[in-house]
Image (spheres, rainbow, N blue to C red):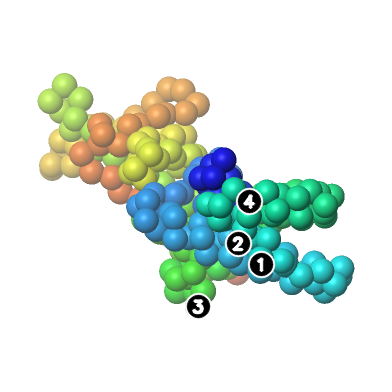
Amino acid sequence: MNLALPALVVFLLLLPGAIARSRIKLVERLSLDYSPLGQVVAETVVWSAALHALWLGAVYLFRGQVLHTDVLLRLLSAEQAAQTRALDAVAAQAGAVAAYGSSLLAAAYLAPLLLRLAIVRWRLDEQNAWCSPLLRFNQAPWYYLLSGADFPRDRAPDFITVSALVDIGGEAILFTGLLQNFYLDPEGQLDRVVLSQVMRRPLAADKGSTGEAQRFYPVDGDYFVLRYSDAITLNVEYITLTTEPGSAGPAALAA
């Protein structure tokens, strides 16, 4: 137990930070966490220290109790006798320790969700926001490109269109449609996009052709799934609905 107990204590101390860090990287069902291991460990330690400091401060403020650092140090000791005394001290306050740990874990799970909702609601991770360096997702450029999250809220696009050039049987075909969703691979690279109202046309139709060949042809189906690996090029266009003066509804599309 000499080494197993300190390892377990360190794990329990860092667990709230690990949970909070993973939750803050979550947008809907998409986890935007592609940081190297060293950065993950450092951020976990920082999150854990901040959460413990906040919780210990709350315990002192409302209960008048303080952390017994001597007990904590004995738990981290490799001496079995010191560990035994520390465990006895913890057992004497098992209820308080359990309440502290369970409430901290619950907060580590729920608080980042509320923080992320606030970040998305007020776009605090926008590229030009003052707090962007602290709240912006690292190494997730596809998220900002395809979600429009870098636009101020009052100028956010109503639609995002994606045009992709795909080689089919040696012929370049241009597909274009409204972006409905996108998926990233474990390395943070774009894996596939889901489009609706998709139209297609041969790229050769752009080379001086006239008449019927210049038309876009609708693609049957409700959704069109395009793998990024199949695309030669990808074009993203942000569309905002505008209203003409005196009009009751949207009258034009502005890119």
Task: Give the quadrant of the N terminus.
Answer: top right
In-front residue for pair 54/240: 54
Residue assigned mark 2: 73
Q: Mark 3 packing: few (<14 Cα in 10 Å), some, or many (20+)?
A: few
The x, y position of residue 118, in whole percent, is 65, 62
- Of the numbered discs 1 and 3, the one sitting upstream in the chain is 1
Instruction: Give the residue number, with chain letter if any, for mark 4.
Output: 81
Q: Amino acid at mark 1?
A: Thr
Q: Nearer the viewer, mark 1 or mark 3?
A: 1
- Image spot of residue 220 (x, y percent): 43, 22
Residue at the (37%, 56%) spot, across then down = 38
Q: Circle 2 sits in a helix, a strand or a loop, which is it?
A: helix
Which mark is first along the chain, 1 or 4? 1
In front here: 41 or 191? Answer: 41
Q: Does 161 appear above or below 38?
A: above
The residues tagged by marks 4 and 1 sit, at their Cα atoms, a distance apart of: 17 Å
The image shows residue 102 at horizontal and vertical percentages of 75, 48
Q: CA distance from mark 1 to mark 3?
A: 38 Å
The kind of residue tagged 2 is: Leu
Q: Residue at x 35, y 32 (%)?
A: 226
Q: Secondary structure at mark 3?
A: loop
> Which residue of the protein is positioned furthest toward the right in this rendering?
63
Between discs 2 and 3, the one toward the N terminus: 2
At which x and y percent is residue 163?
Answer: 32, 43
The local crowd at label 4, few if under 14, some if 14 to 19, many if 20 or more residues have their Cα within 10 Å, is: few
Please identify the quadrant where the C terminus is shown. Answer: bottom left
Disc assigned to residue 130: 3
Q: CA distance from mark 4 to mark 3?
A: 52 Å
Q: Does residue 14 appear to the left or right of 198 in the view shown?
A: right
Q: Type of residue at label 3?
A: Trp
